[in-house]
Amino acid sequence: MNEKLQKDIEILCEMLENSRHTVFFGGAGMSTESGIPDFRGTGGLYTADGAGNEYYLSRACLQREPEEFFKFFNEHMVFPNAKPNAGHYALARLEATGKLSAVITQNIDGLHQAAGSRRVLELHGTLSRAYCSRCGKIYDGAVLSSGGVPKCEKCGATVRPDVTLYGEALDGFIWREAENEIAEADLLIVGGSSLTVYPAASLVGNFEGKHLVIINYSPTAYDTSADLVIRASVGEVLGELVSL
């Protein structure tokens, strides 16, 4: 580890120690370190084939061509062998010791919960849960990869993933919970997010606390507003943070 990175981590550690309410806001960079590709990153689905791939992850595709939707979804969005990385475990330890109030995530992989985090606000939903598009019956997310188009055992309608698809609004209850957490926070740590996906990224713009910290390899629109910007692996930084 270079001297600047070590110094930045020490500064962040001091901020954390002096914080009364810390919130972590995470993006795809948290999951790429677990082997899950970033949809909008280099080589991702969005850049590889253009924005047309958004259709296959849309409400319209699910309704019009459910076979195509589930084929694409299972091939490109489900990673059953992915495991939590050092960053996920570090956040869980920070929460367990009372130093972290909540994790707000744009990811749908459930790795924060798998690592032990309890207060996780999933802005875009989760792959661990599914529900009937007609009667609302809840299913385990495993039903989505059982092959073909999953059907509800109660009413026979299509069972869909409990995630926000293109053409759908975010869950209002989760959004308000996230707004409340950020309003209460005096330290907001943003990790692994380019802050380009809206409306989720707009939450950061509402932060009025004491310290904003961004941990991300590439620049973001909020870098100039941040008190500390760390260009490094979010997993490495968080892992070092809990070891100090």
Image: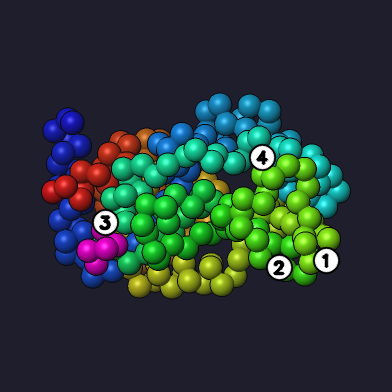
Viewer-closest of 199 and 208: 199
Secondary element type, mark 1: loop
What is the distance, in whole Å, between disc 1 and disc 4 at their CAs?
23 Å
Disc 1 to disc 3: CB gap under 8 Å: no
Write the residue at 28% across / 69% down: 21
Residue occupied by mark 1:
155
Distance from the alpha carbon under mark 2 to that under mark 4: 21 Å
Q: Residues within 10 Å of mark 2 (few under 14, many from 20)?
A: some
Dots 1 and 2: beta carbons under 8 Å?
Answer: yes
Q: Which residues are magenta?
A: 94-98
Q: Nearer the viewer, residue 12 or 114?
A: 114
Mark before the other along the chain sequence, 1 or 3? 3
What's under tag 2, amino acid-wise?
Lys
Against 216, residue 206 (above or below) is below
Compute the Cα span from label 1 to label 3.
43 Å
Residue 14, horizontal then vertical, whole percent: 15, 56
Does the magenta portion include 95? yes
Q: Residues within 10 Å of mark 3 (few under 14, many from 20)?
A: some
Mark nearest the camera among 2 and 3 is 2
Q: Residue furthest front?
A: 153
Question: Could you tell me which secondary element the residue under label 4 belongs to?
Answer: helix
Residue 221, percent from left and from top? 44, 46
Q: Earlier in the sequence, mark 2 or mark 3?
A: 3
Prevailing secondary structure of the magenta residues: helix
Reading the image, the residue beneath label 4 is 74
Residue 230 in sight in this render: no
Residue 82, placed above or below residue 102: above
Q: Give whichever of discs 2 and 4 has the lower sequence position.
A: 4
Q: Which tag, 1 or 4, sits closer to the chain's start?
A: 4
